[in-house]
């Protein structure tokens, strides 16, 4: 039997009714892609979570949900968590069992997390500056590669911290931070973050500030009283919202830094024995908990896989229903075209050729659906890391 005739008839029909054919192929393609998309996202999430958790020995933070603490510390998620005092970090260091890297995670800048930490964090995560230089003073920041690309930022530029409440007149002013460098891409949550010294995070929180020199005669009108070196100023004193070389010396903090907040800390024990002693020491603490991210992750992944199984099973049923609906659509289409097929039979087209033409129509739409599904999965594969990183924030 000559296949060219039925093939030509089917192609001409699909081409003439291209919108209808594309809609049907698109609907089928999306339905076919959904189970694969869910599986791909779960695999990507597992890879992201596992790599980050396995590279972090211990995390300490306030008592509460271990999963929340892990996500906060490893993926910079802004949660409604209580804070620790910085002295908790000093306590771990003073134990002689481990090093501790503080993390202040409360603020955002243009939607990106501001991570207040110390220089040891960059060594621990093997992060290097690809453009510019590292933080050198208060008010400086380095940003992740993905954030720099998305916002068009570069070394020498600036970025503002976001106010917590837009209409809070008495709140802390947004801080203009100098971007000193852009980090090399790492494929982790670090690519989407703004990193500052922990003291800069405290500055954003309003625990410190810089203002006009009240000793100068031109600022005498802002002084309410002087007592034993303590100067009390009125509301007219000018507070700086940017740290510069000219005003750097005017910035100071009120209170004991040991009492200032951090939201988590990465704990690096010197060896296995030190890790066991340290986790046992904090087991009974009512304020501080120490977790092994790898252990917490296993429980989270178990739940994730169970949910994935249910979702995929549901999507397979949906795909089956979509296939049945598509068969119904084709059946109704062929029934409505009986006069067309009768005319083709009258001009000499055999029943076998008509049947083949119908099969080719189904194949064309099916191949289109597979192509759309493949394209969607390929696109998702390219975007999966960014989707998961943003989803974890």
Image (tube, rainbow, N blue to C red):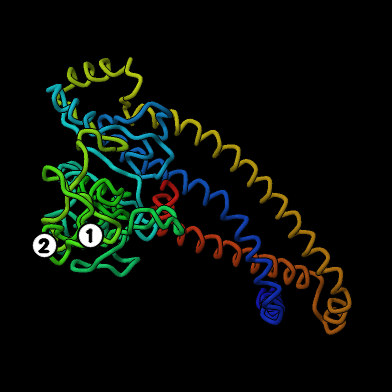
Check disc 2: other Cα within 10 Å, few if <14, some if 14-19, many if 20+: few
The residue closer to the viewer here, 86 or 71, is 86
Looking at the image, is 269 positioned above or below residue 191?
above
What x and y, as percent, mark residue 240? 23, 61
Question: How many marks on residues?
Answer: 2
Q: Quadrant of residue 242?
A: bottom left
First reached walking from the N terminus: tag 2 or tag 1 = 2
The residue closer to the viewer here, 152 or 303, is 152
Q: Is residue 267 visible?
A: yes
Tag 1 residue: 222
Q: Which residue appears at 52% of the width and 48% of the height?
A: 38
Q: Which residue appears at 11% of the width and 42% of the height?
A: 228
What x and y, as percent, mark residue 61? 32, 31
Tag 2 residue: 216
Looking at the image, is 176 positioned above or below residue 274?
below
Q: Which residue appears at 64% of the width and 46% of the height?
A: 316
Q: Is residue 177 visible?
A: no
- The quadrant of the image that shows the N terminus is bottom right
Residue found at the far bottom of this picture: 347
The residue closer to the viewer here, 204 or 179, is 204
SS label for mark 2: loop
Give the side of residue 242 with respect to residue 392, left or right.
left
What x and y, as percent, mark residue 90? 17, 29
The residue closer to the viewer here, 29 or 203, is 203
Q: Which residue appears at 34% of the width and 35% of the height?
A: 83
Check disc 1: other Cα within 10 Å, few if <14, some if 14-19, many if 20+: some
| Mark 2 and mark 1: Cα distance apart in space | 11 Å
SS label for mark 1: helix
């Amino acid at each position: 039997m000559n296949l060219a005739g039925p093939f030509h008839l089917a192609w001409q029909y699909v081409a003439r009714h291209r919108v209808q054919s594309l809609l049907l192929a698109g609907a089928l393609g999306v339905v076919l892609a959904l189970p694969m998309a869910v599986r791909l996202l779960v695999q990507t999430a597992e890879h992201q979570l596992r790599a980050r958790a396995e590279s972090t020995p211990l995390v300490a933070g306030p008592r509460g949900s271990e999963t929340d603490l892990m996500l906060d510390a490893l993926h910079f998620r802004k949660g409604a968590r209580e804070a620790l005092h910085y002295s908790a970090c000093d306590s771990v260091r003073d134990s002689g069992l481990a090093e501790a890297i503080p993390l202040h995670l409360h603020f955002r800048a243009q939607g990106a997390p501001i991570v207040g930490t110390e220089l040891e964090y960059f060594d621990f995560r093997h992060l290097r500056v690809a453009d510019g230089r590292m933080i050198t003073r208060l008010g400086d920041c380095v940003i992740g590669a993905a954030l720099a690309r998305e916002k068009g930022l570069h070394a020498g530029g600036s970025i503002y911290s976001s106010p917590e409440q837009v209409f809070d007149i008495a709140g802390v002013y947004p801080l203009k931070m100098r971007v000193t460098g852009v980090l090399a891409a790492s494929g982790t949550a670090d690519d989407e973050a703004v990193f500052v010294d922990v003291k800069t995070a405290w500055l954003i929180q309003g625990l410190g500030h810089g203002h006009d020199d009240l000793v100068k005669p031109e600022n005498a009108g802002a002084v309410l009283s002087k007592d034993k070196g303590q100067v009390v100023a009125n509301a007219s004193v000018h507070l700086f919202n940017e740290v510069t070389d000219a005003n750097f010396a005017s910035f100071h903090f009120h209170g004991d830094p040991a009492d200032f907040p951090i939201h988590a800390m990465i704990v690096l024990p010197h060896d296995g024995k030190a890790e066991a002693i340290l986790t046992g020491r904090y087991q009974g603490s009512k304020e501080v908990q120490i977790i092994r991210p790898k252990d917490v992750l296993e429980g989270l992944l178990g739940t994730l896989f169970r949910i994935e199984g249910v979702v995929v099973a549901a999507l397979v049923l949906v795909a089956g229903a979509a296939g049945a609906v598509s068969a119904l659509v084709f059946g109704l289409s062929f029934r409505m075209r009986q006069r067309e097929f009768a005319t083709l039979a009258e001009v000499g087209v055999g029943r076998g050729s008509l049947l083949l033409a119908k099969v080719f129509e189904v194949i064309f739409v099916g191949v289109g659906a597979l192509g759309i599904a493949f394209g969607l999965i390929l696109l998702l594969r390219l975007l999966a890391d960014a989707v998961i990183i943003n989803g974890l924030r």
